[in-house]
Image (spheres, rainbow, N blue to C red):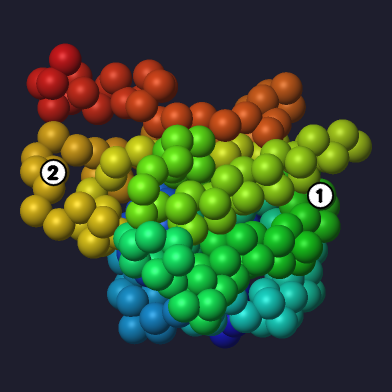
């Protein structure tokens, strides 16, 4: 972590920050005045993100090119964040592995474990390492991305859906345990959004009227707001059920 936070801004960690919703979340939070710690595997993509954040804010982000499956590295990151900032004001967890859309029994054990480690085990390691830092913040906020298939099982989506369902239960249980601090955590289902993952899942799909990651901006800012009520801790929110989605439809002339 070679970069620092010279102006003592609130600090947010964004996983999966090199592309898609994660990248847009990092840009949104940078515009909102946060120092962004951007985590993803591909260093060159993180450097591109850093260049964009410099153009927006005049300051560097902190880029962390590690694999979310590397639990020891996540633990070390938590230690470094504590040494530098003593707290973490926000966590936006977007990193995920779709895997192949195939019957569950067609996965090899190794392929299945890779999806489980990315989507589920890594969520535990983030909670393990970052929860004390969120507790130390005046108003810790966290968003964990989920999927419709966590609640609506579909053929070929079983392993991905199971890991997202596990993420939801884990995060909501953790959120319910946060009674002695000001943490407010949200499980957010963005629904169908134009991302690389979506294109892999539905090649050839007409995405003309589909939201892009940037269209989640106002939703993310609301969920990360320091004024968000504690009573909303642990909520599961579908983007399409919100006024933010209605605003998107109106903006596109679809309503």
Closer to the camera in the image, 183 or 96: 96
147 up-or-down from 76: above or below? above
Residue at x 39% of width, y 81% of height? 42
Give the percent coordinates (x, y) of residue 217: 37, 40
Give the percent coordinates (x, y) of residue 18: 38, 69
Inspect this view and state whether residue 132 appears: yes
Judging from the image, what secondary structure is the residue with disc 2 in?
A: loop
Question: Which quadrant of the figure has residue 51?
Answer: bottom left
Give the percent coordinates (x, y) of residue 147: 45, 44
Q: Residues within 10 Å of mark 2 (few under 14, many from 20)?
A: some
Ranked by sequence position, the earlier of labels 2 and 1 is 1
Calculate the distance from the C-alpha at mark 2 to the C-alpha at mark 1. 40 Å
Which residue lies most toward the front here? 105
23 up-or-down from 243: above or below? below
Give the percent coordinates (x, y) of residue 85: 73, 65
* Quadrant of the snapshot with the C terminus: top left
Residue at x 9% of width, y 53% of height? 204
Inspect this view and state whether residue 84 appears: no
Q: Residue 61 has which mark?
A: none
Residue at x 67% of width, y 51% of height? 89
Judging from the image, what secondary structure is the residue with disc 1 in?
A: helix
Which residue lies most toward the top here? 255
Residue identified by numbered label 1 = 135
Residue at x 33% of width, y 60% of height? 101
Residue identified by numbered label 2 = 207
- In the rendered view, does 12 fall on the left or right side of 157? right
- In the rendered view, does 160 fall on the left or right side of 136? left
* Quadrant of the snapshot with the N terminus: bottom right
252 up-or-down from 130: above or below? above
Question: Which quadrant of the figure has residue 143?
Answer: top right
């Amino acid at each position: 972590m070679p970069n620092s936070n010279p102006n003592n801004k609130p600090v947010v960690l964004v996983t999966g920050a090199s592309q898609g919703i994660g990248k847009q979340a990092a840009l949104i939070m940078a515009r909102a005045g946060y120092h962004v710690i951007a985590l993803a595997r591909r260093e060159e993509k993180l450097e591109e993100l850093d260049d964009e954040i410099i153009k927006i804010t005049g300051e560097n982000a902190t880029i962390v090119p590690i694999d979310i499956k590397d639990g020891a590295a996540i633990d070390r990151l938590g230690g470094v964040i504590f040494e530098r900032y003593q707290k973490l004001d926000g966590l936006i967890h977007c990193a995920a592995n779709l895997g192949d859309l195939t019957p569950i029994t067609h996965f090899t054990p190794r392929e299945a474990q890779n999806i489980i480690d990315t989507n589920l085990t890594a969520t535990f390691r983030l909670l393990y390492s970052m929860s004390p830092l969120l507790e130390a913040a005046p108003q810790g906020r966290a968003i964990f991305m989920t999927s419709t298939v966590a609640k609506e099982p579909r053929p070929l989506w079983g392993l991905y859906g199971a890991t997202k369902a596990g993420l939801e239960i884990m995060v909501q249980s953790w959120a319910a345990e946060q009674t002695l601090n000001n943490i407010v955590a949200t499980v957010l289902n963005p629904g169908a959004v134009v991302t690389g993952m979506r294109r892999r899942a539905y090649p050839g799909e007409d995405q003309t009227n589909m939201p892009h990651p940037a269209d989640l901006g106002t939703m993310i800012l609301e969920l990360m707001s320091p004024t968000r009520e504690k009573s909303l801790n642990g909520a599961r929110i579908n983007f399409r059920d919100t006024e933010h989605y209605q605003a998107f439809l109106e903006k596109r002339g679809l309503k």
